Image (cartoon, rainbow, N blue to C red):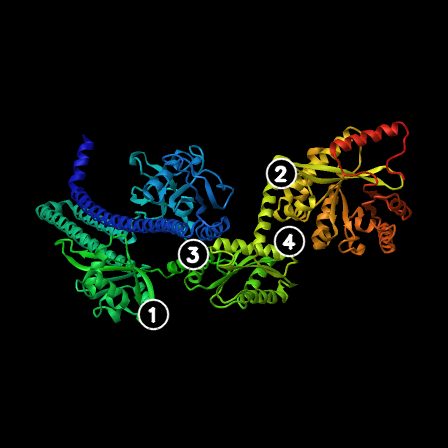
Amino acid sequence: MRVIRTLRRLLKHFGLALLLAGVLGAATEAVYKNALDAQRDRVYAEFQLAAAQHIGTLRKRLDAVLDLQHLLGDHVDVAGPGSAGDFAQLSQSLMRVHTFIKAIVLADIDRSTTPPQRFPAHHVASRAAWPRPGIDLAMEGPAALASLQAALRSGRVVATPLLSPEVDNGEGIRLFSPAGEHLLGLYMHLSELAQSTLWAGMDPDARNMAFTILDATDDPRSAREVYRDTLGEDFETAYVEAIEFAARRWLVIATPTPNHFELTPSPSIARQRATGWAITVLAALLVAFLQTRNFVIRERVRRSTAELATTNRILADTNATLQAEVAQRTASEAALRESTVLQQAILHSADYAIVLTDTDGIIRVFNPAAERMLGCTAEQVIGQYTPTVFINAAAMARMEQKTDQHGFAAVLDTARQLSSSEPVELELVRYDGHSVPAAVSISPLMDAHHGHVTGYLAIASDITHRKAAESRILHLAHFDPLTDLPNRSLLGVRLESALEAANRFDQSLAVLFLDLDRFKNVNDSLGHQAGDALLKAVSGRFQHCVREQDTVARMGGDEFIVVLPELENRRQAAEVAERIIEALGAPFDVKGHRLTVTPSIGIAIYPDDGSTADTLIQHADAAMYHAKDTGRNNYQFYESRLSRLVSTRLALENRLRRALAHQEFELYYQPQVDIASGDFIGVEAMLRWRDPDEGLVDPATFIPVAEDSGLIVPIGAWVLSTACAQAEAWRREHLLDVPIAVNLSARQFDEDSLLDTVAEVLRDTGLPANRLELELTESLIMRNPELTAEVLDAAKRLGVMIGVDDFGTGYSSLAYLKRFPIDRLKIDRSFIADIAFEPDDAAIAETIVAMAHTLRIQVLAEGVETVTQLRMLRSWHCDAYQGYLCSHPLPAADMNALLRGLRAARLYGLPDVGHA
């Protein structure tokens, strides 16, 4: 009971103070809440605007990707797929700019089924091993196949959903679109595109929001995530916007990151709250002080105090209401100021030119981007001009004629005829008279309450760089990127045009097919950069040898075509060829080297040698090969017999390919005999071709063709493998254990994989390395001494022997040969044939033997056919011989029989076959 009485007394004495504190505290908190809500609205507006800007940037970047896809497709449709190299060069230049593109594929369409099920890749440009040429684009799963077929049906760009290795046979997103008779595929990583677009140039710590992209194309309720940033935590708001991209619908969700767009009260609001509570506490203390005064006085003035308390309560309520109204008005004014500042910031920071006009077209707003683009200040144009002052007169006339309107009305009618997403491309005129290409879109501004037009908003972007890029792509499509000469595509157009003119005006025309002699040696010895520099220099000299109306084009590699229209006689073509030969005769300074290059030129005349572009080029090509066969560094006119020679050569090349595929080649073996003991010290493997129709073909007939066509590389690999396998078989049967000699061609020697091939053959056959001798000619060794020494040293490290074949027919310099790790020298048969009755040949052969022995190099004589020759070689201490005196070259079966016979003869003590 005492406690209750005490409480009543306290309430009686201090109740009013507590009540006042409660009322004023509630009012303070109400003001604080209103201010906090206003701050929350402002923060959310800032977040929503920033998110919309980022997503808008992403949408533009995705539109640019589609523009790039359309541009590539149009290029392929107009110019054709071209060569794999041309396609790769164009694609790689685009991929260097757009790093999120991982591959660009041009595929064929297998129309054997409906709808098509196979899309084999024709040309591929890729940053990695996948995709590769020949793969089927549909093999990446049902999603990829569905997108491929949808692109064919719609004729538009269609994107796949996000592919994953767990479900599909690929990863990332593919864009497919028809490109003429082909299908164009673009492989991209969305995450790299999104990051480079949303946060380009921004420090990771400064990112104020995170993004998630969902693919809601098929069922929004089960949208699939295709991209995600690290999401912000402890934030209750998000911004969502849909993007339509290549037949797919993506939802982009933006959420704030930690420490950004936070709702921590601002200092002014915190001060406002503290002030309110300070007033509340002071008022409560004041009332409590008044209540605790002398009890007697309080009783006397109880009525007055009660009235005063009532007045104070009314005053507090009034004060709270007034403060709330003031706070609300302050917040509204602040929000209005912030909105105005935000609009001005957007207007001044925009990269696009923004022009606002009234309904009559008079300019009212002209932002800084418009000032920069059009070369004038806002003060010069606001209130005085309409935007038509910046439109090219010719473009303005076309719009007026098309719309049957005049001035600004014609511009508005033109804009109305286009969709809101389709800007008008115009040639704008700057204040200084210069032109600038721009994409312009115009939108009406509507009154929110009455719905009528209050003005027009024009947004323009400078597309100078885009136009330059389009021009560059068009140039690359028609000109060789190395020499800047017309490429094969532009050559075809110009040659067809020249043929039409020649036919119309009954004129002649010449086509010159030019090939640089032994250009490959430059690449092999000095590298491809030197070769490219030489091609540029050669192209420059061509320009001084032809007329302005003539065309010099690069076909590829070291081949060029010259088209000479309006030809009066054949002599004019010959004079151009002579000028080219003379111009190229002067040395070139290339990377510190003085190089001399010679051309072989074939000439075909219209209409005598053909009436079509393909025929003339083919006949000029045949004449060029005839020029090479007649010694190079000359020109030859086409003759009908050359076509037969080329046809024969091509037929022989095709037969060689068939022979390699059908295993028509054989190896013959000829023993190499030690002159002193008569023992076999080696065997040379010799290539033979047994044609099923013609029998054995002379090696002198097919070896040069195999060299020129490159078939000698796989044929040589077969020879090496077969010879080593046969030598190992003789070793296992204890018939013969000596080195087997295999000739290497120049094309084989130029292969980077030569020594790897040798090592692999030795490993597969089990033949010891010291039982293999690689034979090279003098000219091959001396062609590039530094490179030769490097390769031969590596071969010696493998353990194989090195021999020099046909010595004496080339450089014949033992001083040079001592630089190389050579084991054996073979004197050419042309010196051995006449040593019995030609003292000069005998002296040369004897000198070679003596000098080789001083260098500790063994000597073998080729083509020994008589006992007299053998005795002379023995007297000179020649080490070994090879020739008909011992044995003709024998097929493997006959060689086996010979070896078994020799083994039997040794068992019975008969003399060796090599003694004489």
Q: Which mark is residue 434?
A: 1
> Taking the image as drawn, is residue 164 in sight?
no
Instruction: Identify the image quadrant of the C terminus.
Output: top right
Is 611 or 440 nearer to us in this picture? 611
Q: Are marks 3 and 4 in contact (CB under 8 Å)?
A: no
Q: Name the residue under label 2.
A: 660
Q: Is residue 904 left or right of residue 252?
A: right
Is 26 or 907 nearer to us in this picture? 907
Q: Which amino acid does label 2 sit on?
A: Leu
Q: Are marks 3 and 2 in contact (CB under 8 Å)?
A: no
Q: What residue type is labelled 4?
A: Asp
Mark before the other along the chain sequence, 3 or 2: 3
Place residue 526 in its image quadrant. bottom right
Instruction: Identify the image quadrant of the N terminus.
Output: top left
* Disc 3 packing (10 Å; few <14; some 14–19; many ≥20): some
Is 593 or 707 nearer to us in this picture? 707
Whole-Å distance between the Cαs marked 3 and 2? 43 Å
Q: Name the residue under label 4.
A: 524
Whole-Å distance between the Cαs marked 3 and 4? 32 Å
Q: Nearer the viewer, mark 4 or mark 1?
A: 4
Q: Are marks 1 and 3 in contact (CB under 8 Å)?
A: no
Say which element carries label 3.
Answer: helix
